[in-house]
Image (tube, rainbow, N blue to C red):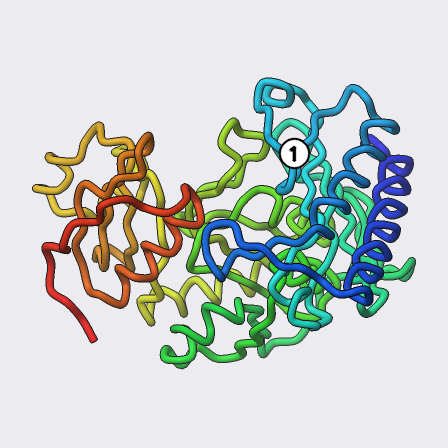
Amino acid sequence: MTFYGHELAVAEGLAREAGELLMQHRRAGLKVDYKTSRDDPVTAADREASKFIVDGLKHAFPADGLLSEEETDAPDSRVGLERVWIIDPIDGTHEYTEGSADFCVSIGLCVGGEALLGAVYAPATGELFSGYVGVGVRKNSRPVGFSERSAFVVSTSNTEYGRELHRYGLPGLAPSGSIALKLARLSAGEVDVTFTMSPRSEWDIAAGDALVRASGGFLRRRDGRPIVYNLSRPHIEQGIIGGRPEAVAWLETQLQANAIPTVHLNVQPGDPAWQALSPADQAELAGEPGVCIRYAGNRVLALLVVDPRTRTVQRSKGDAFHLARLTRDVTRAVGPLQDEPPQDGPRGP
């Protein structure tokens, strides 16, 4: 087994210092801007913390690749490298700007496309979760791991719970903000399993994924396929699920029984989600690069076909509620959409 003690110590130190920088910014007062919508805030603190972490990692590990949410990505400089650091200087920016403690600094190291090492620091509460695969996880230097509870606690998105999940009657739901902090708490046994309906990006989950794996669990896509890191387009493009293996197995049955939707962006014929499309849609859309669906089981709830160059909506159909959720996810991924035509399916409540 390869040891990563030096890498972990560097990541822990940078996470703590970046966290203090974030708290200084919040005490001084924040100016909030927005990327794609009001759901997608950004502050000067995001950018300053990102630069601090990136500079520190460059100095300590000059041969490694770097990917940060707040830095201009240069895929050619990292794709193909064995090691890449994947950073979210503030995961949970909305909570950060609102004065909540539910945000964190997330620093992950991926090796050969797999999440291997993570440091997740919640500066408002002083909690540092860190570790790597093969040695386990520590919270503030104390060894932690999965719980043994039989009534599973399901960590879910505040936003997804408020908009939709509260309707389904899933047991054990515990809504919160930051996905990186959800995964860190999961690795420490504070919750047991998590899932999302909407897509996530590599920087949202890399460090937390490593911590879950270090505790003996896993994180994967909702369609059953593994998550691969350091791709040229660093987005998972669909919902995720992960945690204690027995809790994940239980949750899968719950999601299927309750027909909980997920989104898949840029669906291609080889993807499992392609089978949810009707034969007519499969024939028409084969080869299209911007097919995006929201589906549950084998039923498509909403469909958008978007030209990736112009962000023009070429086709739109589905229930109005699900189409709105899908449009939000597509907008967060590619930016504001252009010239959306009237939808060609029935409108829902």
Is residue 177 or residue 283 the one in the foreground?
177
Which quadrant holds residue 21? bottom right
Residue 331 rendering spot, x and y as whole percentages: 39, 49
Q: Residue at x 71, y 26 (%)?
A: 83
Q: Is residue 127 above or below residue 3?
A: below
Residue with the mark numbered 1: 67
Q: Residue at x 18, y 47 (%)?
A: 277
Quadrant the C terminus occupies: bottom left
Instruction: Give SS at disc 1.
Output: strand
Q: Is residue 161 above or below residue 143?
A: below
Horizontal side of residue 237 vs 65, given as left or right: left
Horizontal side of residue 6 vs 228, given as left or right: right
Q: Residue at x 44, y 77 (%)?
A: 170
Label 1: few (<14), some (14–19) or many (≥20) C-alpha neighbours in 10 Å:
many
Quadrant the N terminus occupies: top right
Tell me the kind of residue under disc 1: Leu
Which quadrant holds residue 335? top left
Residue 241 rendering spot, x and y as whole percentages: 50, 56
Is residue 68 or residue 220 the one in the foreground?
68
Which quadrant holds residue 229? top right
Horizontal side of residue 212 vs 27, given as left or right: left
Is residue 10 or residue 272 the one in the foreground?
10
Label count reads: 1
Q: Is residue 263 above or below residue 11?
A: below
Q: Residue at x 30, y 33 (%)?
A: 310
Is residue 309 or residue 245 the one in the foreground?
309
Residue 118 rendering spot, x and y as whole percentages: 75, 46
Residue 191 rendering spot, x and y as whole percentages: 65, 70
